[in-house]
Image (cartoon, helix red, strand yellow):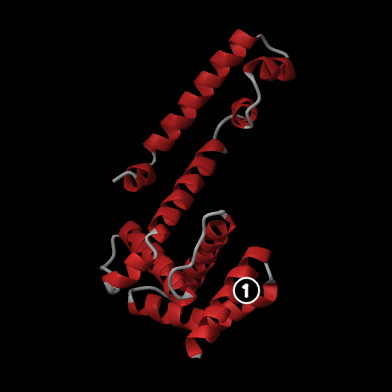
Amino acid sequence: MTQVNTKHKDEYYIKGINEGNSKVIQELYLAFMPRITRFIEQNNGNKQEAMDIFQEALVIIYNKVRSNDFRLTSSFYTFLYAICRNLWRNQLKKKKSIGVTTLAPELLSEESGVVEAMENYAKKQLFREKFHLLKESCQSILRLFFEGISMREIAEKLNISEKYARKRKFDCKEKLIEKIQADPKFKELNS
């Protein structure tokens, strides 16, 4: 009977996150934040870092839940904990700090999509960060291109020739790739 209640509660959390329900989010903080804080403090962190990790984990879960193929195959807490643990391990690597206490491998295998979701989130963050470093004219042409607008239409919108629009798109894309590849985070994400 407890398992049914737990499963029901897990579904309640997932539905609340998907809907952006502030009451559910508050319940998540009350129910799980103390345990995540304790874990991070035991592994060379502090309360503020725990809060940051917890919030980032909720964003990852939100993005994962919004994808059409999401299926929770463990308890909600196990899922949340695995994400927080991996985020914190990455944080420690960045700080070149002491290693983190290991989690039983069976917990990680229950949510193999967690690592993939975190990597995708990190890649998107890096892309956005470097995209915003481009000049506004490059951002405009790439934004239109990423929206699937044809080069002919882009040229018309920007009042330039189609040949020049293609050249600008290519140059801007190359600048973006250079910025991304020059960042140490890129090497970390691809290793």
Point out residue 32 in the picture as x, y percentages from the top left corner: 50, 80
Q: Amino acid at mark 1?
A: Ile
Q: Quadrant of residue 38?
A: bottom left
Asked if residue 172 is positioned above or below residue 126 in the image, the reply reads: above
Point out residue 44 in the picture as x, y percentages from the top left corner: 34, 74
Asked if residue 95 is positioned above or below residue 23 in the image, the reply reads: above
Point out residue 166 in the picture as x, y percentages from the top left corner: 57, 15
Asked if residue 141 is positioned above or below residue 92 in the image, the reply reads: above
Q: Looking at the image, which residue is at 27% across and 70% down?
A: 105
Q: Looking at the image, which residue is at 43% across and 72% down?
A: 74
Q: Nearer the viewer, residue 147 or 109?
A: 109
Q: Which residue was labeled with disc 1? A: 25
Q: Quadrant of residue 182?
A: top left
Residue at the far bottom: name it. Answer: 1
Task: Give left or right: position of 175 versus 106.
Answer: right
Q: Looking at the image, which residue is at 31% across and 59% down?
A: 93
Q: Nearer the viewer, residue 166 or 19?
A: 19
